[in-house]
Image: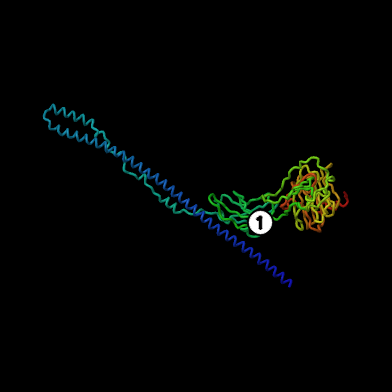
Amino acid sequence: MDSQKEALQRIISTLASKNDEIQNFIDTLNHTLKGVQENSSNILSELDEEFDSLYSILDEVKESMINSIKQEQAHKSQELQSQISQCNNALENSEELLEFATRSLDIKEPEEFSKAARQIKDRVTMASAFRLSLKPKVSDNMTHLMVDFSQERQMLQTLKFLPVPKAPEIDPVECLVADNCVTVAWRMPEEDNKIDHFVLEYRKTNFDGLPRVKDERCWEIADNIKGTEYTLSGLKFDSKYMNFRVRACNKAVAGEYSDPVTLETKALNFSLDNSSSHLNLKVEDTCVEWDPTGGKGQEKIKGKENKGSVHVTSLKKHTRSGTPSPKRTSVGSRPPAVRGSRDRFTGESYTVLGDTAIESGQHYWEVKAQKDCKSYSVGVAYKTLGKFDQLGKTNTSWCVHVNNWLQNTFAAKHNNKVKALDVSVPEKIGVFCDFDGGQLSFYDANSKQLLYSFKTKFTQPVLPGFMVWCGGLSLSTGMQVPSAVRTLQKSENGMTGSASSLNNVTQ
């Protein structure tokens, strides 16, 4: 009976998963159909605009050429009309002179005939008919204004849609996810020397497989990529996966998107648990500050916004003067309304824990203290850590502790035993927790220098733990284990500095 139920449950789970997959595909098809309709309408509108532009240019050219022909016609007509007028005047004068000369032949008197002959000679010498050019100033040839648009017609007949680059192909084997960076590599299915650049789009998701249309974040864009590889750096991995797609662009148009690829970007994300912290701690999601007033009126600030980079919340500087010693800070005098449920830690245990338990795997986060912070601890603890317990003073917690009060000390603490650390306190501390391997290591987050390692066997889930007095801490999560830390971990086994070294050093 039980085995049949288990088998049925597996079938139900498989069917539900398949139904979800089919529904996602239907959503994708509907989204694509809507896109086809919208894009077709846009393309038709753009085509009309392009042809209207061509028509407008042709009309302008035609009008210009017509004006040229008309101007040439007017010029030649004017020249010929002028010549015709001059010739008519010359012909009229010549006919008059011819008539006079003909009449002169009938003159009988020699003296009078001689006089007429001299007049005719003088008039012939001055006659315009003999000084007139009988060659037209212009010809009737208009062939220099003829056109032959055969080549242009051929060119117009070859008008076609722009050549669109083919969709690139993302190679998941060549993609790399490391150190909160993602390198995406792709190739073209065939050589295309007209490609100008590529556009990479990416978005975070908690779903494996094909990207979903609904309930997803918007695509972000990396544009004008000249090569076939691109690295996104400084990411905060606050989702299980990231979707990637890329398209090629020439000078005129962008091609189809590649098939999307989903890469795993899993990392530990947690916030500080404000609801169960010490009353003298002012806690937000990723920062904590010691507050001797007990945090009256403080409320937890919600909303972890994703900005595409590792989220580090900066702290306001503590401006109070005359800060009292922790031994002089009384919690019992607080009004009941302020306390609420925040009685998880009390007394001198100025502690706040993370809100996410670590039960397996390797994880990494970083902590930065205010410059004037007098005392703080960073480490992990079991959920059973007592309300009066301080980090490192029980066998259920491990930490490194920095003290800048009266004297400066830097030490590793566990089970009320201390190991002084002969290294400088870094600006930022990196915490590496290998739950299955039973190792808790602390690093200089910038140089990745190993500060100290605990070797143990975790018998319960652990929570990130923080103690702060007279100052504040800021937290960075959503981080992968850095490659440098992984490399150091491989060579660190067998080195001194394990928890066993604390057995003979009592606080």
> Mark 1 is on which residue type?
Thr
For image coordinates 86% across by 51% down, the residue present is: 416
- Residue extending farthest to the left is 108
Picture layout, residue 11 above or below residue 470 = below
Residue 241 seen from this side: yes
Residue 412 % position (x, y): 82, 49
Picture layout, residue 329 above or below residue 43 = above
For image coordinates 64% across by 63% down, the residue present is: 20
Q: Is residue 276 left or right of residue 259?
A: right
Residue 380 % position (x, y): 79, 53
User: Depth check: 33 or 172 in front?
Assistant: 33
Picture layout, residue 404 above or below residue 158 = above
Residue wearing tag 1: 205
Mark 1 element type: strand
Residue 400 % position (x, y): 81, 49
User: Depth check: 142 or 374 in front?
Assistant: 374
